Amino acid sequence: MSASAASTQRQSISEDWIDVPPVFIVGCPRSGTTLLRLMLNAHSRISISSEGAYIYRLRSTLLSYRDLSDPRHLEALYEELLPLLETEKFLSSPSFDQLLDWVRQFGADLHSIITFYGTWEA
């Protein structure tokens, strides 16, 4: 496969990926939700990131950053979320450059940013 064909295929996959609706697994502590998440994540076509408590913080503060297409505002959001991401189970934090590349490709609205953080590990 040529480099341009591979790039086109990756872009098509990426564009389809952002339109996949999220699925939430919820439950009480110690009820088996982590085990269920790990079992589902073992499937080759399913990827589930960490428990995602940072999404509540992201949702509540996103509008205070104004225009997230501006790299300065996006970096401020990134810096605020970084400590929260570091405490998540089974999650290594994305770099700011990865977030910036995502925003350039998919935009900086709430749906896009939450999709990035919720699915970037996949």
Image (spheres, rainbow, N blue to C red):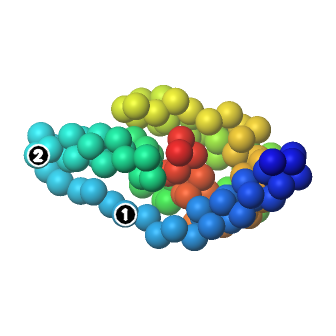
Q: Is residue 106 above or below residue 40?
A: below
Horizontally, is 51 left or right of 35 in the view?
Answer: right
In front of the other: 84 or 45:
45
Mark 1 Cα-neighbour bin, 10 Å: few <14, some 14–19, many ≥20: few
User: Pointer 1: what residue?
Assistant: 23
Nearer to us in this view, 121 or 59: 121
Q: Is residue 46 above or below residue 75?
A: below
Residue matched to label 2: 31
Task: Name the disc covering residue 90, or none.
Answer: none
| Residue 110 left/right relative to 102 | left
Q: Residue at x 49, y 59 (%)?
A: 60
The amino acid sitting under disc 1 is Val
Extreme residue toward the front, this view: 1
- Residue at x 43%, y 64% (from the top left corner): 22
Q: Nearer the viewer, residue 3 or 60?
A: 3
User: Gap in Å between the C-alphas at discs 1 and 2?
Assistant: 18 Å
Q: Is residue 45 visible?
A: yes
Q: Is residue 110 visible?
A: no
Residue at horizontal 83%, vertical 55%?
5
Looking at this view, is 23 or 39 the one in front?
Answer: 39
